[in-house]
Image (cartoon, helix red, strand yellow):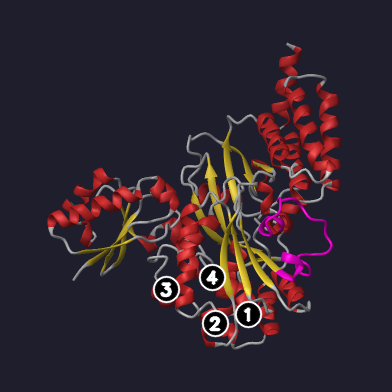
C-alpha cells in the first residue's frame, strides 16, 4: 500500500525550493523502491517552515520542515515515511501550535490535499453551501449572508449583505459578479494562498452570489503577477464546469452561471473597485465618480456584485453552516474571521486566520515569535501601504474595524509589515507619500497634485529645511487629501504619514537636531 507524501505547490513554497524537494523525494523513493503517492498540496501558511513536507501515518499527518533536497536522503534513513524522528521533525501537523490555535473557516481546506481535486474538495464539505443556496430563494440567501455579519475583506469593510441586497433588488436583464483579486497591498498574500490552495472555494462563493442576485456571468480580475494562481483558477473553472457546478444547469438547478478569469496589468489603482471595472471593460483604469454605485450601474452599466477574494470565499461556509454560526466568531460589528498576514521583520511570518478581537501583541509574539532580528518591535504597518504605522502603545487594541478607526488606523486586508527599533519612520512616511504619487490614476487633484507636493515637502522635512513650517504644511496637505480625494488611494495615503508624525516625532526631531548641529 502506497504512503501519501504531501509537498506544497504554493508560490511561496515554490520560491523556497518546494519543486526541487518534491523531485528529490520522488527520486529517492524510486531509488529505494518505496511505494509513495506524491501529492502537491496548498501551503499551510507557516512560511518559515517551507518547504514543509507531510506524511500520512496511522497517527495522522506528520510534518517535517523546512526540507531541502539535501535533507531528503537522511529523512528516508530516519524512516520519515512512517513518522520517524528527524532533526526537521515538527510532529503531528494538526498539533503544531501555530495552526492548532487558529480558527480556520475561510482557509479550512488549504493544505489538505491537491487543490484541483474536485473529489477532495467535496469530501471536506465543499459544494454544500451551493447546494443549500440553490434550494433557497435569492432573498433568503442574501438574508443569511446579512445575518452572518460578513463585511468586505478588501479594506472598506462594507456589509456584504447590503451590497448583495442592492443588486438583488435592482432590475436588470443582465447582472454580474466580479471578484477583486488584484491583491496589491504590501504584506498581503491570503488571496493568492486561497486561489492557489483551494480555488473551488472562490468558484463556489461566486456561484452562490450569482444564484442569489440573479447574475449569470462572473469575472475574476486577477493581478498579472500571480501566474500560478491564474493557471490554477483556469483549471479549477474547467473542472467545475465539467462536473456541472458551472454552466447552464448549476448543480442541477436549471440556473446559469459562467465564470472567467481576466488579468490586470500591474496598476495598484485597479484594486479600487470602480477602476477595476473600467479596466475590466477594456478602458484605462481610473476611478469613477459615485453615485451611481456599482451595485446599481457597475460592469458595462449593469447591476454588479463586486467583492474581494476573502469575502467571496467566506460565503460557502456561511451557506453551509448558517449565518448564525459565522456570526458567533468575532466582536462588535466585526464578525467572523480574517486571515491575518504577518510579514516584515518577524521571526515566524505566515498566515493566521483568527476571529476579530485578538491583538497585535498576540499576533506578534504568540504567533510571530517576535522580530527576526531579536530587537524590540517598534511599529507595525497594518492594512497595506495606505495603513497607519501602529506604535507599541497601541499593540493591545483589539483588531476590530471600529476600534482601529477610532485611532485613525485600519485593518484593511489584514496585511501586517513589522519593523524593529532600527526603522527610520521619517523615511517610511516619505515612502508612503511617494507610493501614492506613483500609483495615483490622476483623475482627482487632491491625490494627483497632493501626493506629488507631499513627497516634495517630505524631502524638505528630511533635509531639515524650515522644519516646523513644513511639518505644518504637510498636515494641512494631508487634511486636503483625506477630505477631497475621489477614492481611498488619495484619501488614505495620509494615514501612514500622519501616524509617523504623531507617534514617532523623535525621528523628525533627529532631523531638527542634525540641522541645528
Badge 3 or badge 1: first in the primary sequence:
3
Query: What mark, if any, has residue 211 been given in the picture?
Result: 1
Badge 2 or badge 3: first in the primary sequence:
3
Which region shows up in magenta?
A: 278-304
Q: Pointers 1 and 2 in contact (CB under 8 A)?
A: yes
Badge 4 or badge 1: first in the primary sequence:
4
Q: Which residue is mark 3?
A: 118
Q: Which residue is mark 2?
A: 250
What's the CA distance linking mark 3 and mark 1?
Answer: 21 Å
In percent of the image, x 86 and y 41: which residue is there?
480
Mark 2 burial class by Cα count in 10 Å: few <14, some 14-19, many 20+? many
Q: Secondary structure at mark 3?
A: helix
Magenta region's main secondary structure? loop
What's the CA distance linking mark 2 and mark 3?
Answer: 15 Å
Mark 4 burial class by Cα count in 10 Å: few <14, some 14-19, many 20+? many
Q: Secondary structure at mark 4?
A: helix
Q: Which residue is mark 4?
A: 203
What's the CA distance linking mark 1 and mark 2?
Answer: 9 Å
Amino acid at each position: 500500500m502506497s504512503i501519501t507524501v504531501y509537498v506544497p505547490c504554493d508560490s511561496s513554497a515554490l520560491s523556497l525550493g518546494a519543486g526541487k524537494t518534491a523531485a528529490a523525494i520522488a527520486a529517492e523513493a524510486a531509488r529505494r523502491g518505496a511505494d509513495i503517492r506524491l501529492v502537491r498540496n496548498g501551503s499551510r501558511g507557516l512560511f518559515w517552515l517551507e518547504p514543509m513536507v507531510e506524511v500520512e501515518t496511522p497517527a495522522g499527518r506528520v510534518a517535517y520542515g523546512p526540507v531541502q533536497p539535501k535533507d531528503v536522503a537522511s529523512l528516508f534513513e530516519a524512516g520519515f515515511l512512517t513518522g520517524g524522528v528527524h532533526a526537521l521533525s515538527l510532529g503531528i501537523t494538526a498539533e503544531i501550535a501555530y495552526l492548532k490555535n487558529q480558527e480556520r473557516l475561510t482557509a479550512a481546506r488549504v493544505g489538505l490535499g491537491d487543490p484541483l481535486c474536485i473529489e477532495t474538495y467535496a469530501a471536506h464539505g465543499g459544494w454544500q453551501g451551493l447546494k443549500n443556496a440553490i434550494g433557497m430563494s435569492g432573498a433568503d440567501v442574501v438574508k443569511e449572508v446579512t445575518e452572518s455579519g460578513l463585511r468586505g475583506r478588501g479594506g472598506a469593510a462594507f456589509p456584504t449583505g447590503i451590497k448583495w441586497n442592492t443588486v438583488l433588488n435592482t432590475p436588470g436583464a443582465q447582472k454580474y459578479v466580479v471578484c477583486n483579486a488584484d491583491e496589491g497591498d504590501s504584506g498581503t498574500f491570503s488571496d493568492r494562498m486561497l486561489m492557489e490552495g483551494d480555488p473551488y472555494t472562490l468558484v463556489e462563493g461566486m456561484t452562490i452570489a450569482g444564484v442569489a442576485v440573479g447574475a449569470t456571468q462572473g469575472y475574476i480580475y486577477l493581478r498579472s503577477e500571480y501566474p500560478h494562481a491564474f493557471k490554477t483558477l483556469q483549471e479549477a473553472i474547467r473542472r467545475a464546469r465539467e462536473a456541472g457546478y458551472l454552466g447552464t444547469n448549476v448543480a442541477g438547478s436549471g440556473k446559469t452561471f459562467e465564470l472567467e478569469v481576466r488579468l490586470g496589468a500591474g496598476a495598484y489603482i485597479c484594486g479600487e473597485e470602480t477602476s477595476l471595472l473600467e479596466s475590466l471593460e477594456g478602458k484605462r483604469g481610473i476611478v469613477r465618480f459615485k453615485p451611481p454605485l456599482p451595485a446599481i450601474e457597475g460592469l458595462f452599466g449593469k447591476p454588479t456584485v463586486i467583492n474581494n477574494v476573502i469575502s467571496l470565499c467566506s460565503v460557502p461556509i456561511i451557506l453551509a453552516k448558517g449565518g448564525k454560526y459565522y456570526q458567533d466568531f468575532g466582536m462588535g460589528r466585526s464578525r467572523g474571521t480574517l486571515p491575518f498576514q504577518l510579514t516584515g521583520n518577524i521571526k515566524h511570518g505566515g498566515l493566521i486566520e483568527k476571529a476579530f478581537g485578538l491583538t497585535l501583541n498576540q499576533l506578534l509574539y504568540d504567533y510571530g515569535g517576535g522580530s527576526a532580528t531579536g530587537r524590540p518591535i517598534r511599529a507595525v504597518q497594518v492594512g497595506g501601504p495606505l495603513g497607519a504605522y501602529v506604535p507599541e502603545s497601541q499593540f493591545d487594541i483589539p483588531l476590530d474595524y471600529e476600534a482601529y478607526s477610532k485611532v485613525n488606523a485600519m485593518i484593511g486586508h489584514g496585511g501586517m509589515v513589522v519593523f524593529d527599533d532600527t526603522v527610520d519612520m521619517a523615511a517610511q512616511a516619505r515612502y508612503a507619500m511617494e507610493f501614492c504619487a506613483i500609483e495615483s490614476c490622476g483623475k482627482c487633484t487632491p491625490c494627483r497634485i497632493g501626493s506629488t507636493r507631499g513627497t516634495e515637502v517630505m524631502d524638505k522635512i528630511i533635509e531639515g529645511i524650515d522644519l516646523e513650517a513644513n511639518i505644518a504644511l504637510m498636515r494641512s496637505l494631508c487634511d486636503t487629501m483625506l477630505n477631497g480625494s475621489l477614492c481611498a488611494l488619495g484619501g488614505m495615503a495620509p494615514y501612514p504619514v500622519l501616524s509617523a508624525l504623531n507617534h514617532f516625532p523623535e525621528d523628525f526631531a533627529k532631523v531638527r537636531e542634525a540641522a541645528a548641529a
